[in-house]
Amino acid sequence: MLMRGVTPIPEGVLDTVLGPEAAILDVGCGSGIWCSEIGQNYPLAKVIGLDVAKCDPKDPPNNCSFIQGNLLDGLEQCYGQFDLVHCRAVIIHVEPAKQNWAVRELVKCLRPGGLVVLSDFDELFLDEHRTRLPAAQDNDASEKRVSWMARLRCELFRQEDPVDSILRFKIRDALQDDPEIDQTTLGTALYEVPVGWEGYNDENGALLGKMASLDFMDGLERISEDVIEVWGRNVTPELTGTGTRFIHRWHSTWARKTGST
């Protein structure tokens, strides 16, 4: 819905990558929804979902299969076997010192001419005017424009509050530094997600806002009980759009491996 397709790549371009007998790998497949969607769109392709937890979706397409594995253990068993490698909301969970290595592991899984697509959360939270909202602190004045969701992100990932995007530039730089990547194919996109409100006249804005709100509410369950009452009281207005209305962003970066299939 956010990318208006299974990847940010136009379908016509994706069709040139995923020819007959194409192989697709989804690293960090989670529930397996993305695997099922692309498997339906490309019924002749072989789709494999890999995740640290067992994935057993209901009624997946016949061309989809699922295996357990961890990107952090390396992906040698997958080297050079896939025309498309997809990885969403995974790299942000990798410790910063290993993120470049993780990107290289994904590229190694491609056949010549194959495509890697990396999508993830942006670290920043913006208000409805697209101004950065710093993470709230316990002693902030009530009128100060801050975000408790930004604070939640910092706590969950045990990171300082960033003043600029970091991961999307790091992913791009990792691909630029990889000699196996065709630099003429490198592309990026940035997507705005309203949380708890309808956004800017986007036809899917209201639904995206509701879904994003539910996703962030799930994150609250990972906060310890001794702070959840205070945090819940401060975060709820943001998640429902009744307080500071904010935007969260996603980014995608993609490129093709050198050579031809």
Image: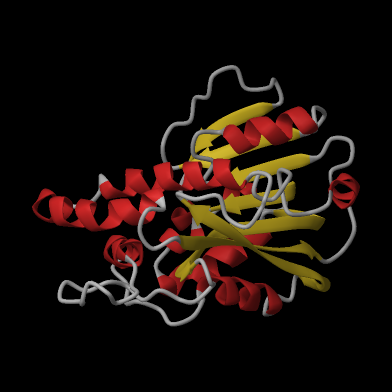
How many numbered marks have been drawn onto this rendered protein structure? Answer: 0
Furthest toward the bottom, the residue is 163
Q: In the rendered view, does 252 fall on the left or right side of 120?
A: right
Q: Pick the quarter of the image with the N terminus.
A: top right
Give residue 166's position: percent from left, percent from top: 50, 77
Colour scheme of this structure image? secondary structure
Q: Position of residue 214 (x, y in %)?
A: 41, 42
Measured along the vertical axis of the image, is residue 175 above or below residue 108?
A: below
Looking at the picture, tell me which residue is in the foreground, 186 or 165: 165
Rendered location of residue 97, percent (x, y): 42, 75
Vertical relation: 232 (above or below) 146: above
- Is residue 177 something that shows in the picture? yes
Instruction: List the single residue furthest toward the top.
Output: 59
Q: Position of residue 244 (x, y in %)?
A: 38, 63
Picture quadrant of residue 185: bottom right
Instruction: Specify whether 113 is left or right of 126.
Output: right
Q: Quadrant of residue 118?
A: bottom right
Residue 27 visible in rendering? no
Furthest residue in direction left, as rendered = 226
Residue found at x 48% / y 42%: 210
In front of the other: 245 or 149: 245
Residue at image coords 49%, 39%: 30
Image position of 260 (left or right of 172): right
From the viewer's perspective, is residue 47 above or below residue 104? Answer: above
Residue at (25, 48) in percent of width and height: 222
Q: Nearer the viewer, residue 197 or 133?
A: 197
